[in-house]
Image (spheres, helix red, strand yellow):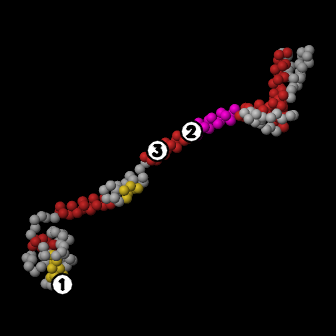
Amino acid sequence: MTDTPMTPDQPTPVELTERQLDALSAAGNRALNDHYHEDLCFCRSWPTSCVSSGGYFMGTWDTSAFDIGLPAVLGVWESLRNDRHAAKIAELRADNEQLRTRVAELEALKPARFQDCQVCGAGYEYGQSCSVCEFKKQMAAAQAGVRDALPRDLSPEQARWIEHQHPETSTAHDCTLPLVRRLDCGHRPHEVCQDCDRCPHTCRCASPEATL
């Protein structure tokens, strides 16, 4: 068989094994013989035999056209199937690209896991409260509770007497500088506040002038 040059737009013939080509050619010739016999004779014994005067048999109309043309025919069929699949693949790729774009848009809207507090500037995890601000709130509430529990409008002598009897209670202001040295408390030398004449340290003593 002489090979016919292929034009650029002509599908490439399918490569078939000899066994495959024989099976396909046999199927084609069988269909061809059935067609021609039906046009000429309607005997019921076909394809085993034929009762007509022509003495037809399976193979009377066999042709080599199937051996010659099947690879090219199957090449066209394969090309058409590939075109259909290519269109479907292109459609799926377009859908996939749209999904990727949508996912990127949603990711851009998602807040970062770690945020900076707008109040104190400390970092905290998204969805959680700022631990620094929470701590400050709790401390402020605790200090406010202590201040609310203290008696008001005490004289310095009353404040010193309360602290002497209940050293765990603070009744006056926080003693700060200036401090003055005292040596007459009965303990080691220490300092007392010039504002309230109290010892801001741990010996819990007061000045000799305090009347208890």
Q: The residue under label 1 is which amino acid type?
A: Pro
Q: Secondary structure at mark 1?
A: loop
Question: Distance of mark 1 from mark 2, alpha carbons?
Answer: 88 Å
- Residue 2 is left or right of residue 159, and the answer is right
Mark 1 and mark 2 residues within 8 Å of each other at the beta carbon: no
Find residue 105 and name its label. 3
Residue in front for this viewpoint, 40 or 113:
113
Q: Which residues are magenta?
A: 80-94
Q: Residue at x 24, y 59 (%)?
A: 141
Task: Indicate the position of residue 210 as horizontal and vertical percent values.
Answer: 9, 77
Q: Which residue is mark 2?
A: 94
Query: Is residue 6 found inside the magenta-colored segment of the image?
Result: no
Q: Earlier in the sequence, mark 1 or mark 2?
A: 2
Give the quarter of the figure containing the C terminus.
bottom left
Give the quarter of the figure containing the N terminus.
top right
Judge whether residue 11 can be spotted in this image.
no
Find residue 189 and name its label. 1
Q: Mainly helix, strand or loop, the magenta region?
A: helix
Dot 2 alpha-carbon crowd within 10 angstroms: few under 14, some 14 to 19, many 20 or more: few
Q: Residue at x 12, y 71 (%)?
A: 159
